Image (spheres, rainbow, N blue to C red):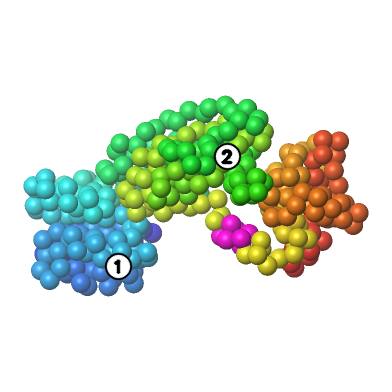
Amino acid sequence: MKKILIIEDNKAVRENTAEIMTLANYQVLTAENGIIGIEKAKGFLPDLVICDIMMPQMDGFEVLRVLGKDSGTASIPFIFLTAKTDREAMRMGMNLGADDYLTKPFEEHELLEAIACRLKKHDSLKKEIIKNLESINTFLEEASEYKDLEGLSKNHNLRSYEKKEIIFWEGDNAHSLYFIESGNIKTYKGTESGKELVTGLYGPGDFVGQLSLLHAAGTYVENAVVLEDAELCAIPKADFIKLLFGNHMVSQKFINMISNNLISVQAHLVDMAFASVRQRAAKALLELYEKGLIKEKPNQGMSIPREDFAGMIGTATETAIRTLSDFKDEGLITTDSGRRIIILDKEELELVAGFK
């Protein structure tokens, strides 16, 4: 049963609205002013808030501001309910992040339809998204229905990239976020000695370029090159910024989509500083396995250039090759005719990596 919080200082309106909601099979809680409403919102954690604007002690705008600053309540759909009809007040409410606006007096069906619509959109955005182009376009279509996100471009198309083709260079103007539909991408930075430091290997469902779009200089902070023929779609920076800051619920879902598990990136940096080459190599193999880039059977996955693997674990190519040879001698891995690495003993690799 969905939970609704009604914040309204007029007793008759509050009780009538609560009755309509209860008869529509919602669980309803009411508050007679904004201060009490905020307390109940934080404790009740409703699925939707209906709030009057003109109230004593604290108006609806302030209620929305306070709830929007709290991570526990920021993404709750919010509908203003008011007798005030001027466009300036409506625009102010929407700028603060309100999802809808109903003018009193309202018809029962108008209220129920507005609530059902907002709950449906909210539930849709909460669902775990399957990361492919069709789902990305569906997400953008749903996000564009929010008033502050109306200008989003939709129906993005794929562009094909060939092996070794550069997607962007470090220092180029950062203009797009890239979604990988198929193929594999390597990101890397050049060192003063002319070597490559591999910062990531990415496959289908991953995003590339998100940190660069937030970089103060407005440029890409690394290079990106295609390892295997790939299909990518580019999301313009303007859309990226809108999705990140335009609406609390959309922003939360978007951040989850594009994060590519940044916690693992932080852990990788710690490993580079403190773990042994053997541990780093084992963790890198397991990470590539989890990404589907290497497999447990021949002729599957991709061939990882040894210099790229060395760049991932922060060591010389010769050292990386020697470590892989040790793992091969120990029966942890093998290779096929295409130089693809094959995992033979995942549990033992996990022990070497320190996961067990």
Up the image or down, 293 lies above or below 277; here it is: above
Looking at the image, how many numbered discs can be counted on the residues? 2
Q: Which residue is mark 2?
A: 224
> What kind of residue is marked 1?
Ala
In front of the other: label 2 or label 1?
2
Q: Position of residue 227 (x, y in %)?
A: 66, 36
Q: Main secondary structure of the magenta part?
A: helix
Q: Nearer the viewer, residue 328 or 243?
A: 328
Left or right placement of residue 105 versus residue 313 in this view: left
Task: Please give the residue where the numbered disc 1 appears in the rendered image.
Answer: 41
Nearest to the observer: residue 258 or residue 19:
258
Query: Is 279 above or below relative to 97?
Result: below
Residue 92 is a magenta residue: no
Q: Residues within 10 Å of mark 1 (few under 14, many from 20)?
A: many
Q: For the magenta stretch, what is the residue range?
A: 263-269
Q: Earlier in the sequence, mark 2 or mark 1?
A: 1
Question: Which type of secondary structure does the marked residue at label 2 adopt?
Answer: strand
Q: Is residue 268 magenta?
A: yes
